[in-house]
Image: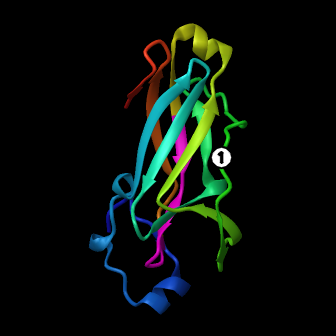
Amino acid sequence: MRGWLAIPLLAFTAQAGAVNPAELLDPRDAFRLSVRTVDDRTAQIDFRIAPGYYLYRDRFRFETESGRTIADAVLPTGKTKEDPFFGRSQIYRDHVSIKVPLSQADLARKQVRLKIVSQGCADVGVCYIPQEQWVNVKLDRFQEEQ
């Protein structure tokens, strides 16, 4: 089993039958990340979510390379899912855009390196471990860079 693979949710797995890990998408393919600047103070994080997969709203975390937690990111309301393990949860399917405000220190440097932590699952009953991804946001050019 590959290291990035998830923790099987046994209740789902039992209902869905055996899950072949080779059939699961790599999390970077299941949850495609891109980032762009909206203006000189805001980065927009976009996830394109593959069919049959979803991301948990409350599992997102944002941090700068210097370790500053960004707690005031703007996440849209998700769809409610009754989860036997996590209880009532909000999830995103297909696509989600999140606005992340940038600090004055980031603005002064004209760039910021962001750590984005997310967690998602496949409908077949497997959840991935939390994924940590880093992106570079250039503020003077307002363009995406990874």
Q: Which quadrant holds residue 99?
A: top right
Image quarter hosting the N terminus = bottom left
SS for dot 1: loop
Residue 92 drawn at (x, y percent): 56, 60
Which residue is nearer to you in this view: 126 or 108?
108
Q: Residue at x 37, y 31 (%)?
A: 146
Residue 32 drawn at (x, y percent): 39, 49
Q: Which residue is mark 1?
A: 75
Q: Residue at x 42, y 39 (%)?
A: 34
Q: Which quadrant holds residue 62?
A: top right
Residue 77 drawn at (x, y percent): 68, 55
Which residue is at the far front?
A: 38
Which residue is at the far left?
A: 22
Figure coloring: rainbow
* Neighbours of disc 1 within 10 Å: few (<14), some (14-19), many (20+): some
Which residue is nearer to you in this view: 23 or 95?
95
Residue 81 drawn at (x, y percent): 64, 72
Which residue type does callout 1 highlight? Leu
- 100 on left or right of 14: right
Total number of numbered discs in the rendering: 1
Q: Residue at x 46, y 35 (%)?
A: 35
Q: Does the magenta-highlighted stretch encompass residue 106? A: no
Which residue is at the far top?
A: 108
Q: Main secondary structure of the magenta part?
A: strand
- 63 on left or right of 16: right
Q: Does the magenta-highlighted stretch encompass residue 116? A: yes
Q: As displayed, is residue 75 above or below residue 14?
A: above
- 15 on left or right of 106: left
Q: As displayed, is residue 68 above or below residue 6?
A: above
Q: Residue at x 49, y 54 (%)?
A: 95
Region in magenta: 115-126
